[in-house]
Image (cartoon, rainbow, N blue to C red):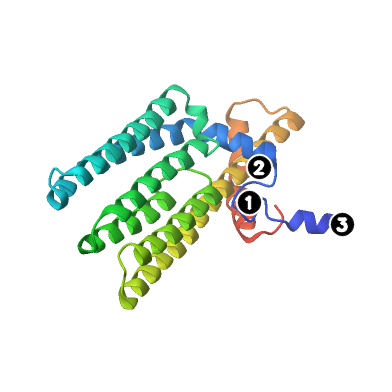
Amino acid sequence: MPSRDDSATQSPLTRTGGFRDNELERRFRLEHENDDARHLAWLSAVTAVLFLSFTALDHALFGTGRLFLLLLGMRLATAVSLLGVTWHLVRMPAQASSGVRATIAESVLLMALLSVAATYPAGAFSSVEQGMTLYVLAIYFLVPGRWIFTAIVALIGTVAFVVIATLRWNTALSAWATIVVLLGFGNFIGALGSYRLNSLRRLQYHALHAFRQSNDQLRRGTGVPMGWPSRLVRCVICRSLGSILSNALSGSPL
């Protein structure tokens, strides 16, 4: 059983980047849900349009044959699904805070990319590989979802893409190694950078939450009115805000 000193020095975050305190995690999501919903809605809409625009490349590769029609249907279905996520988030922004809608959008786009990879000929290998790398980095750095969910989706997508490249394109060893290294490096950079950004975002909120609690306790204890004397008191508290954030980042007690 951990001692009181151990609990005091414990980081407020779990290893997956969320708050240990479930109530604080709920408040954090609630405060950011509108911004996250708007960001994810715009991102889904733009991604739908861009993904659909690659129909021109499909036509250049396959003409107007059966494969082109299959890819066109898949792209239309993906675009409609992403636009459905956009519409849903505009109507219910609270759904963005759980990270589930972001994970759904990531999964839909991943299945579409893997379908393209399984259909395109070996001559289009480089464009598909670049698209998959861009996808991995984009979901880590642009999608406001749960870090652990994003990491799982990216890892599944990477493994599936490597399997497709091995079986579908009969990839040479050098090209196969390039895929593994490139996507592995993209996952490493994306996961590490996204985790740090996610942690800093919550630690800033944690410091602000501690400041608000200290300010409220001080006001209740002293009865200072909200005039210039209270501004002086808040100025003193503001000086400690940097120290609070520094201690939170280093894992030392607040």
Amino acid marked by disc 1: Ile
Q: Where's residue 196, x and y in %?
A: 51, 57
Residue 225 vs residue 23, the one in the foreground: 23
User: Label 2 vs label 1: CA separation?
Assistant: 8 Å
**Point 21% across, 60% down: residue:** 124
Provide the residue designation for mark 2: 210
Amino acid marked by disc 3: Met
- Disc tally is 3
Q: Where's residue 251, x and y in %?
A: 66, 59
Q: Where's residue 20, x and y in %?
A: 69, 47
Q: Secondary structure at mark 3?
A: loop
Residue 186 vs residue 175, the one in the foreground: 175
Provide the residue designation for mark 1: 244
Q: Residues within 10 Å of mark 3 (few under 14, many from 20)?
A: few
Provide the residue designation for mark 3: 1
Q: Secondary structure at mark 2?
A: helix
- Which residue is situated farthest in the bottom direction here? 174
Q: Is residue 111 above or below residue 94?
A: below
Q: Is residue 22 above or below residue 181?
A: above
**Left or right: 5 in relation to 187:** right
**Point 60% across, 57% down: residue:** 249
Q: Residues within 10 Å of mark 2 (few under 14, many from 20)?
A: some
Q: Earlier in the sequence, mark 3 or mark 1?
A: 3
